[in-house]
Each structure stands twice: as C-alpha cells, then as structure tokens.
C-alpha cells in the first residue's frame, strides 16, 4: 500500500473519476478532510506543495501559540521559523537519505549522523527571524515546542485518515 501522505497528495491532484481497486482518491480525500483544519493545511503545504495553504496554516499556528501580552508579529515570526524548519526537515547534505557516496562506498552522512534530519543552528535561526543570537537562545525551547506540536498534528492526521479509511 502506498505511503498515505503521498496518496493524499496524489488524490488532491487527481480527478475524482479514477476507478482504483477499493480505496479511491475520493475516499482518501473524504477521510483526510475529517481531520482538523490546521492538520489538513499542513499536509497540503508539506506533501502537496500547495503554497496557498501556507498563510492560513501560519495564521492558525500563530493563533494557537499567541500568549496574552505578546505581540502577534513576534509570535508569528517564531511560528514561521518553526514551520519553515518543519517543512524543510530533510538533511540538505544527504537529501534525507542519511547516506552519502564516498568514492564508490555509501557512508553515513556526517551532517545528520544518518538521521536524515536537518538541524538548524542558532545562527541560521537568528538570520531567519532577524534576531540576535542571544534572543534565539531564549526562544529555542519554544521553537522545540512548536516542532513537537507540528509533528503531533502531522501524526494525528495520518492516524485519523487511516482510521477513516479503515486501514487500521
Ligand atoms: Zn544527512
């Protein structure tokens, strides 16, 4: 069975008259749309490269993490940084495979230690958020929380869609 994220992305692009064996794109879309709005927007951006869904996703994310007494713009900047990192989470050195060619031998990528995950430095974050490194250091924990939240939502859409499709 194909990866569900890819299947949903394909379904978003397909016409609705395909006659696949038993689970048609329309079924997947129906199941997928039962998830919460932020989740479906995130899937559209990340797995379907749908640029239109980026802004509403950022808006909902910012609304969720906005605390009393904080400037909306400030929170949006942090959320945007976390969202962009989440969207570009594949190691740039190995392209997310965890391995690189060394001569004719495949070796573990030294950049991500084989995890395939792109890590972002304080310097990169400072640049992305137009802030000083000292400011970024104070925000790292919060960025981590937003990352956890995004990962959680991503998993929930996957589980919910699988349940709706009676795959699990
Ligand atoms: Zn790597």
Image (spheres, grey):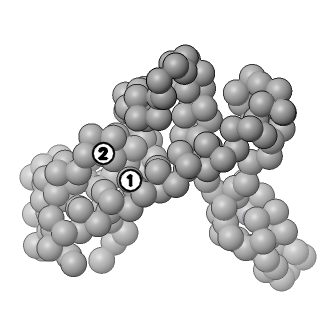
2 or 1: mark nearer the eye: 1
User: For residue 133, what is the image quadrant?
Assistant: top right
Residue at 82 percent across and 27 percent down: it is 132
Which residue is tagged 2? 40
Q: Farthest residue to the front: give it.
A: 69
Q: Position of residue 158 (x, y in %)?
A: 32, 62
Given residues 101 and 127, the one toward you in this image is 127
Q: Position of residue 38 (x, y in %)?
A: 33, 41
Q: Farthest residue to the bottom: give it.
A: 105
Q: Earlier in the sequence, mark 2 or mark 1?
A: 2
Is 51 positioned to the left or the right of 146 in the image? left
Is 51 positioned to the left or the right of 7 in the image? right
Is 60 positioned to the left or the right of 65 in the image? left
Q: Which mark is residue 89?
A: none
Is 50 positioned to the left or the right of 124 in the image? left
Given residues 2 and 117, the one toward you in this image is 117
83 to 151, vertically: above or below: above
Query: SS for tag 2?
Result: helix
Given residues 140 and 165, the one toward you in this image is 140
Residue at 76 percent across and 65 percent down: it is 112
Q: Quadrant of ligand 1?
A: bottom right
- The quarter in which the N terminus is drawn is bottom left
Q: Is residue 68 visible?
A: yes
Q: Which mark is residue 153?
A: 1
111 to 2, vertically: above or below: above
User: For residue 58, what is the image quadrant?
Assistant: top left
Q: Position of residue 90 (x, y in %)?
A: 63, 57
């Amino acid at each position: 069975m194909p990866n569900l994220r890819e299947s949903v992305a394909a379904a978003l692009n397909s016409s609705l008259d395909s006659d696949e064996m038993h689970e048609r794109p329309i079924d997947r879309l129906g199941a997928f749309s039962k998830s919460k709005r932020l989740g479906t927007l995130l899937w559209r951006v990340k797995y379907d490269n749908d640029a239109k869904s980026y802004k509403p996703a950022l808006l909902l994310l910012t609304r969720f993490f906005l605390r009393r007494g904080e400037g909306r713009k400030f929170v949006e900047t942090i959320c945007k940084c976390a969202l962009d990192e989440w969207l570009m989470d594949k190691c740039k050195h190995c392209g997310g495979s965890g391995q690189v060619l060394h001569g004719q031998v495949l070796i573990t990528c030294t950049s991500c230690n084989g995890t395939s995950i792109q890590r972002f430095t304080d310097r990169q974050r400072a640049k992305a958020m137009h802030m000083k490194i000292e400011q970024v250091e104070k925000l790292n924990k919060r960025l981590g929380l937003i990352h956890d939240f995004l990962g959680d939502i991503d998993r929930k859409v996957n589980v919910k869609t699988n349940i709706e499709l009676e795959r699990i």
